[in-house]
């Protein structure tokens, strides 16, 4: 088996919920030794995202990590944490700014213990600014960034995504930032603190909205599935009551689509002849395209599109996605044999790397599953010392 790209990288993950777990998931999938430092008896709140009794969020996004249930509010717990910091490459935390200081664990103390340490500090609003002390979640930054105001239909309320999108984007940024800082550390010997906010991460993917507003006074409004940049772009019902998604992002794509569906005459109509005109006349463009597509079944459209080189895709539910032949051929879902739940599938490690691919080794661990092993291997504690820590409530095991 090929050596993982991040073999030997040691990560302490003090974060909770999604963004930090997404960041350390990337590192763990590619071989980093990620130690989840969790509060005894409680653990990461992601463990409580359950459907019935199934903690599948934790099992997927906590995978390939080890759990150390350590009470860092106690003096002994802090001593053990700092000993681990001295041996770590990366530390990830998402406390509200100021909370670690209140515990007596400011970033500066970590860097005194290990000047080569990379600290990834994730927060909703950032480490400075007037909102720094506010608690926050992805939902709130999705609202404040302008994203929710752009999402949905004009006659309906602003819409929030049904997934923790800001957290996920932030987590991917976080993994990149940690590795960039690690590269710098390896070149110079210098550790550093990465200040990463959910607000800035979600805003960064919205496009040049500030520049547009400052240049023209306009900004994106809720416009359903339509794009302010290209048309037609929407979901359309088919003859068999299914849905197809189209995005005519280039003039050639729109031309092929119109010729294929009997709408070639639109190319001679000034209201539809150019992309800019079609965007301006979006309602009428969508009405005409919907009428044309509604004469075909989904399978007929997909077959015709493929033959003509027109971009389109079915609007799937998850039940369709998991059985799709392309999803199966690509191995987008990886099977995992869980000793408790049996075999189930989760997303495969990303991105695909030819020389050092990621791998799923374990599902998210039970709380404190590796406490004894970590303290014994990393700090040389004896079994008796570990038992004493458990009796004192410093650790769970």
Image (cartoon, helix red, strand yellow):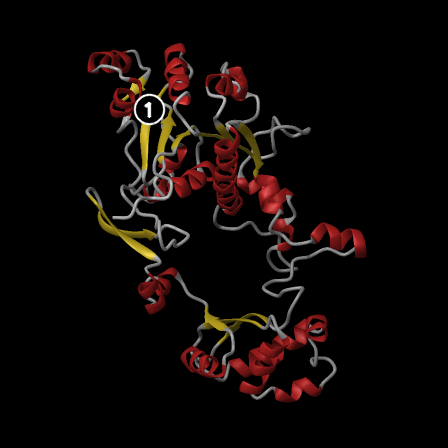
Residue at 32% x, 65% y is 329
- Under tag 1, what secondary structure? strand
Residue 193 is at least partly visible in this image = yes
Residue at 36% x, 50% y is 349
Q: Is residue 218 above or below residue 295?
A: above
Q: Is residue 284 above or below residue 181?
A: below
- Judge left or right: residue 40 versus residue 336: right
Residue at far front of view: 187
Q: Is residue 62 above or below residue 109?
A: below
Residue at 22% x, 14% y is 382
Residue holding disc 1: 69
Quadrant where the C terminus is found in the figure? top left
Tag 1: Cα neighbours inside 10 Å, few (<14), some, or many (≥20)?
many
> Residue 24: x and y, percent?
42, 38
Residue at 43% x, 82% y is 300
> Residue 199: x and y, percent?
60, 40
Q: Is residue 356 above or below residue 320?
A: above
- Judge left or right: residue 54 versus residue 315: left
Q: In which quarter of the image is residue 86?
A: top left
């Amino acid at each position: 088996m090929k050596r993982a790209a991040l073999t030997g990288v040691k990560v302490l993950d003090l974060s909770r919920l999604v963004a930090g777990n997404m960041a350390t998931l990337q590192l763990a999938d590619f071989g980093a030794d990620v130690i989840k430092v969790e509060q005894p008896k409680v653990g990461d709140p992601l463990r409580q995202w359950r459907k019935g009794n199934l903690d599948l969020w934790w099992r997927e996004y906590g995978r390939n990590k080890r759990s150390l249930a350590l009470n860092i509010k106690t003096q002994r717990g802090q001593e053990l944490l700092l000993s681990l910091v001295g041996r770590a490459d990366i530390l990830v935390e998402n406390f509200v700014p100021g909370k670690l200081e209140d515990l007596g664990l400011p970033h500066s103390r970590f860097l005194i213990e290990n000047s080569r340490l990379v600290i990834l500090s994730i927060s909703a609003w950032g480490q400075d600014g007037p909102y720094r002390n506010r608690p926050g979640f992805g939902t709130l930054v999705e609202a404040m960034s302008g994203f929710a105001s752009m999402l949905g239909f004009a006659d309906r309320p602003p819409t929030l995504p049904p997934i923790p999108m800001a957290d996920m984007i932030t987590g991917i940024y976080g993994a990149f930032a940690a590795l960039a800082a690690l590269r710098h550390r390896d070149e110079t010997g210098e550790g550093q603190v990465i200040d990463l906010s959910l607000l800035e991460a979600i805003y960064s993917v919205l496009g040049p909205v500030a520049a547009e507003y400052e240049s023209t006074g306009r900004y994106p409004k809720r416009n359903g599935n339509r794009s302010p940049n290209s048309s037609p772009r929407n979901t359309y019902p088919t003859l068999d009551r299914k849905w197809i998604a189209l995005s005519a992002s280039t003039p050639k794509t729109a031309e092929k689509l119109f010729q294929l569906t009997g709408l070639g005459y639109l190319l001679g109509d000034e209201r539809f002849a150019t992309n800019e005109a079609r965007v301006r006349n979006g309602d009428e463009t969508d009405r005409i395209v919907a009428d044309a597509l509604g004469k075909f079944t989904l399978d007929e459209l997909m077959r015709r599109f493929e033959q003509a080189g027109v971009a389109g895709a079915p609007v799937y539910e998850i039940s369709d996605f998991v059985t799709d032949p392309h999803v199966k051929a690509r191995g987008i879902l990886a099977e995992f044999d869980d000793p408790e739940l049996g075999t189930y599938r989760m997303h495969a490690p990303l991105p695909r790397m030819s020389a050092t691919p990621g791998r799923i080794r374990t599902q998210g661990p039970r709380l404190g599953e590796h406490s004894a092993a970590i303290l014994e291997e990393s700090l040389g504690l004896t079994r008796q010392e570990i038992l004493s820590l458990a009796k004192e409530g410093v650790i769970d095991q």
